[in-house]
Image (cartoon, rainbow, N blue to C red):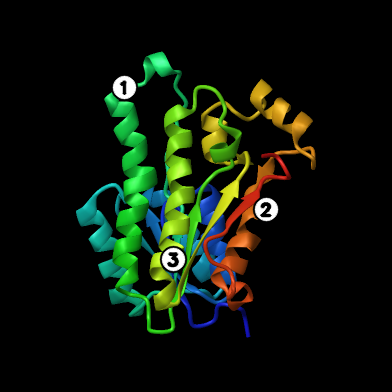
Amino acid sequence: MSKLTGKVAVVTGASKGIGADIAKGLAAEGASVVVNYSSSKEGADRVVSEITGKGGKAVAVQGSVANGADVKKIFAETKKAFGKLDILVNNAGVYAFSPLDQITEEHFHHIFNTNVLGLLLATKEAETLFPAEGGSIINIGSVVSTLTPPTSAVYTATKGAVDAITRVLSKELGPKKIRVNSINPGMIETEGTHTAGFIGSDFQKNIEATAPLGRIGQVKDVTPVAVFLASDDSAWLTGELIAVSGGHR
């Protein structure tokens, strides 16, 4: 029997990149998956088709985690489709670097509303669907919270908040047998990093020159860690921040 047979997972921001691969990885281990997306219905439908095409169970549910009404809808649809929840992957996130003299209120709230408020709202709704035996919440942070690169003040602040929230909620939700851990990836090749111009940049070359394993990551480097944290293999882990970065930190 697969590690996650009978489990139900919600993966936010799962239409592409790390979220899409995690959704497919959880499904491959037997979980029924809610593939959440904010704007890319085509991408979410593609992820669902890949999962169902291999005999898995998945549905796509639209909603922005930065919007409270949308978050309630996401989890209402989860309950309607699968009846419960065992795994939440708080993957939805946005990033944009900006030097101090160009930071605006709009820039700040755009990033914080998704990366921090969205994570809290999703976790709040998810908590009500976990069964008595508990479950696993997996936050997607970033090694930027320790690397602290220039021009990333706002984005790095959101990921520092994710680190703190992970540890706070591991204590708050532990009595309910809900484990809370964070995966903190290094630079991962995704559609997003291509769009942002990181791939092929001096930034990438610097990481490859300084990372002990000498390369940037691929989504397949992250997904097995998410499967581990979702499964009973990690039953004694909570409040952990796991760097998945080739040693770059």
Q: Residue at (46%, 60%) from the top-left corner?
A: 89
Give the amino acid at mark 3.
Lys
Q: Can residue 166 be seen here? A: yes
Q: In front: 79, or 52?
A: 79
Q: Position of residue 186 (x, y in %)?
A: 63, 42
Q: Which residue is mark 1?
A: 104
Apparent side of residue 51 relative to residue 102 in the rendered image (left or right): right
Q: Which residue is mark 2?
A: 221
Q: In front: 54, or 67?
A: 67
In this rendering, which labeled residue sits more in front, label 1 or label 3? 3
Give the amino acid at mark 1.
Thr
Give the amino acid at mark 2.
Asp
Apparent side of residue 78 relative to residue 214 in the rendered image (left or right): left
Label 1 or label 2, whichever comes before in sequence order: 1
Quadrant of res 144: top right
Badge 3 crowding class, 10 Å Cα cut-off, few under 14, some 14 to 19, many 20 or more, is: some
Badge 1 crowding class, 10 Å Cα cut-off, few under 14, some 14 to 19, many 20 or more, is: few
Q: Can residue 62 be seen here? A: no
Apparent side of residue 67 relative to residue 42 in the rendered image (left or right): left
How far apart are the alpha carbons under marks 3 and 2? 28 Å
Tell me: residue 185, above or below residue 109: below
Apparent side of residue 129 relative to residue 206 in the rendered image (left or right): left
Label 3 or label 2, whichever comes before in sequence order: 3
